[in-house]
Amino acid sequence: MIMMMSGIVRGEAVAAEWSAEPSLSMKGEYNSNLLLFNGNNEVWGDWVSPKMKFKGATESFEIDGSAKGDFIQYYGSQDRGLTNLYFPIHAAYRWKRLTFGFDGGFTRDNTLLGELQQTGVVLNFTQRNLWTATPSVTLGLTERLNWQLAYHLLDASYQNGLSLGLVNYQVNGGSSKLSYNLRERSQVQITGDLVNFVAPDIDQTWTYYGAGAGLSHNLSKSIIVTASGGVRFINTNQGLSSGSLSQNDVVWVYNASIKKEFERSVILIEGSSEVNPSGFGRLIQTDRVGGAISHNLTENLTASVIGAFYFVSGVATVGGQSFPDTRYTSVSPKLSWTFAQWWTLDIGYSYAERAVDSLNQWNFANSTFVMLTYGGPKWSVSR
């Protein structure tokens, strides 16, 4: 698809700009309880992370993405090496009132990174391969009214998953969004979704559909407010040797945020309730409240704090097995110092806590890191 778009762009006699930004980070880390579980889970680790960001644009076409690797070695209770890979990509081609878009890519990470941050669920420690693809078509019906159709694919697989109680799964879905710009600072959206989530290893299928509405509004040049809500009608089907069991549920979802920019600071507060698939082969309802504060102490020194509270529960109890309610908390302050033209030093601390009352589990972790990053000069070509 991208090659086809690039061919179209080469056929146009328009100005184009292409750029790439390389960087290399080296990090040392200590974590008192990497797995957030009972027993000795203390580790030290070193990370080497090369990265290349790229971007290209013409009058009608744009593409941007990155290629990043994390080469990790842990010592202590977890004496093992890991390799994380990230290849996200975004592309869009505009033709008259139509815009063809694509978002997706490949991620190889571990379950204590991406999946934990999305769902708030601590899974057994292993690596995950995740493919995502979202092609879309947006039609400008009028100058203010747009209609978008999109298809969503997500495919997740786990290394040695079954032996750790994790199952591979695939998500296919479609969505429709109608957006209307009320004024220069306001936009209203109406959405509809249909999603199918399949975990073939345990012969379990979820199908859910729903609708929602949202509003985004710039109260001023420095304050942005967004809010949306909707409903999901969920059907769960569990295959059994003697037949199958089915259950229907109704779940309400929402998302809201407010962002305020000052001369030297940025404050973000957000809350959400979402339905997510997980490596346990279940649909998870995650209620999350979080925020971030960033302040430029000087021209080269920035302090920031990111925090979030997760309240996690299972959507269905098919077969008499319910997912235990879980609470997860994370707070991470950080100092970032740009001490030379291409060099940045980051020092950070994180506190994480996990509680499962029904299993009488409560665990916490303290972690620190020091990271040195070299960001080379930006390479760019214009024609």
Image: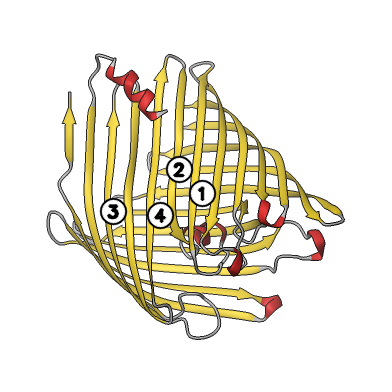
Tag in front: 3 or 1: 1
Way the structure is coloured = secondary structure
Based on the displayed image, in which of its 4 quarters is residue 318 positioned? bottom right
Identify residue type, mark 1: Ser
Q: Compute the Cα span from label 2 to label 3.
A: 17 Å
Which residue does the numbered mark 2 point to in the structure image? 224
Secondary structure at badge 3 equals loop
Q: For the C terminus, give its image quadrant.
A: top left
Residue toward you, 110 or 270: 110
Which residue does the numbered mark 4 point to in the structure image? 267
Instruction: Give the residue displayed 49% in from the left and 26% down from the top.
Output: 183
Check if mark 1's residue and mark 2's residue have beta carbons within 8 Å: yes
Q: Is residue 360 left or right of residue 338?
A: right
Which residue does the numbered mark 3 point to in the structure image? 264
Q: Compute the Cα span from label 1 to label 2.
A: 8 Å
Q: Is residue 339 left or right of residue 332?
A: left
Task: Give the mark, 3 or 1, whose residue is nearer the N terminus.
Answer: 1
Secondary structure at badge 4 equals strand
Q: Compute the Cα span from label 4 to label 1.
A: 11 Å
Check if mark 4's residue and mark 3's residue have beta carbons within 8 Å: no
Which residue does the numbered mark 1 point to in the structure image? 257
Mark 2: give few (<14), some (14-19) or many (20+) Cα within 10 Å.
some
Task: Give the mark, 2 or 3, whose residue is nearer the N terminus.
Answer: 2
Residue occupying the far bottom of the picture: 39
Identify residue type, mark 3: Arg
Instruction: Give the residue displayed 45% in from the left and 29% down from the top.
Output: 101
Mark 3: give few (<14), some (14-19) or many (20+) Cα within 10 Å.
few
Secondary structure at badge 1 equals strand
